[in-house]
Amino acid sequence: KTAMGARLLRNYIEQPLIECNLIKERLEAVREFKENMITREEMREYLNPIYDLERLMSKISYKSANPRDLIAFGSSLSMLPHIKFLLKSFETVLIKDIYEQLDPLEDIYDLIQKSIVEEPPLLVKEGGIIKTGYNEDVDRLRKAKTEGKTWLMELEEKEREATGIKNLRIKYNRVFGYYLEVTNSYKDLVPDTWTRKQTLANAERYSTPKLKELEDIILGAEDRLFSLEYDLFCEIRDQIALEVKRIQQTAKAIARLDVFTSLALVAEQNNYVEPKINTSGSISIKNGRHPVVEKMMTNDMFVANDTLLDNKENRVSIITGPNMAGKSTYMRQTALIVLMAQIGSFVPADSADIGIVDRIFTRVGASDDLASGQSTFMVEMTEVANILRNATKNSLLILDEIGRGTSTFDGLSIAWAVVEHISNTSILGAKTLFATHYHELTELEGRLEGINNYCIAVKEQGDDIVFLRKIVKGGADKSYGIQVAKLAGVPSSVLKRASEIVAELSGNDLVMKAKNLSIPDEEEYQQEVLPLEPAVHSGTEKHSSKKSGRQRDMDQLSLFSVCGNEDIISDLRELDLTRMTPIDALNKLYQLQTKIKERI
């Protein structure tokens, strides 16, 4: 309802709690607001007109607030006594604390109400800011501005009666200002207290102290009025600024109230449940749902799924299944449910028992970074390196398709090694959801402790498939990539050829190799420092001459045999390319090519 509440909710999401008791206190507050729907909604009606008190207070403190800001501030303060009254009946610790922290600020509200007009101008030096009755000088100047002619007529009549000069007139010109004009026939009746200002052929002009006073009031009224109103406005603004601590405290209380009532409303509207919070590290979610996706689905029913992760037998869940089946949605919903629980929110599930995590790491999606010159795979590996360096055994890791940005064998190797690293309790042992298309990773179940295979259920109907969106135990036996391509509208000729190719390639022994791949013991598995940025190897770096057979196999092949070509290599080394013209370079290249052809 308020900008303050929106900022605080964002802060809660960015900095979730890791203290069990603090989380439970928030959940208790949300529960009580959820149970008291009528009072909560009445309270939210009072929250709705409240402006951003924190921003307004900042403007007031920095002397940049205009009269309309003060009116907005005052209208917001008018809601506070009603909210304070409604809070009195609540019992939970945090709501009582909000009640204590919420100052109605009635003195500030009264000051604004009696001093500032309801619809002031935008600019502070235009006048029309101060209410009539707040300051006598303002009232007098304002009256002088609007009623100056009436005052002059009254003075004229009064002096006419006092002196008996029947044709006495008060007139004005730019040189002398206001003056009393008396014809020569009545100049003997002019009192001695009058001051002659000008003599004419048939009349004389005079001034009196009272006329001079009225002249000063009338002619300077507008300028003095604007100046006085500005000074008074600044005084009022400064007076409010002195109460900055009280106002900030109240603004924070309103923000917390807004967040808790909003969380209660969302929980009520979407059938969320209060999660249990534990410190054992286990995460058990019954029929969890994605809070955003389920709201976007209008025609279909969202398929809920269970989640079980702990620090023992269920540390790593390897999830396989075709694209579009719902793997990413399932993993994201788990992360969101854990996050929601740790900010003190109810969660979209039938039940949830959430073990507190210290961090949530995600590696989901594929994108490059053109500005930094990083490829999709480089971005992916940088993020993986960051996760492996900073995650702890109490973290939750969401890893989607690690290794897909490179070749099949490299990608599978990296994904396999990452799973080994994560599952090893002596190194990391973090709770992990690991989605992959590398079905070979399912061979790790039973070979590494704490790894379990899951897949997204799919129903085959002839050449077509139906995504059931349900997480089931076990690994997927195929990727259904061609069927997904068919759903996407790929031409039938391409699909037919793809089916022929996959039939030829499916007989490879990659799965058999994965089954026979050795798993290192924990003593053999040494953790290395993973750089957050790619290592740069200098040309002077020395490499060990002793290499295993496996390492030698991985060395890059030479461009050509060194033996018998020493003269060509020597020529290449001695070339100074910076001083060669393009034609010289082409001639030299032609000579070297001729030599090589003669020796083949």
Image (tube, rainbow, N blue to C red):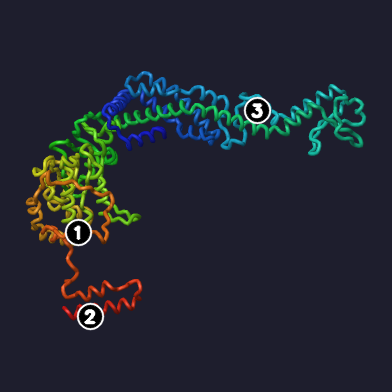
Q: What secondary structure is found at the residue carrying circle 3?
A: helix
Is disc 3 surrounded by few (<14), some (14 to 19) or many (20+) residues within 10 Å?
many
Q: Which of marks 2 and 1 is nearer the N terminus?
A: 1
Position of the C terminus by quadrant: bottom left
**Residue where numbered disc 2 is placed:** 594
Q: What is the distance, in whole Å, between disc 2 and disc 3 at their CAs?
A: 103 Å
Q: Mark 1 points at which residue?
A: 543
Element carrying mark 1 = loop
Residue pictured at 92% horizontal, 37% vertical: 201
- Based on the displayed image, in which of its 4 quarters is residue 474 positioned? top left
> Which quarter of the figure has residue 356?
top left
Regarding residue 368, the answer to whether it shows in the image is yes
Residues 25 and 184: in front is 25
Q: In this view, does 112 lie to the left or right of 31?
A: right
Task: For the residues labelled 3 and 1, say whether their Cβ atoms are less than 8 Å apart.
Answer: no
Q: Mark 3 points at which residue?
A: 138
Going by the numbered disc 1, the residue's amino acid type is: His
Q: How crowded is mark 2: few (under 14 residues within 10 Å), some or many (20 or more)?
A: few
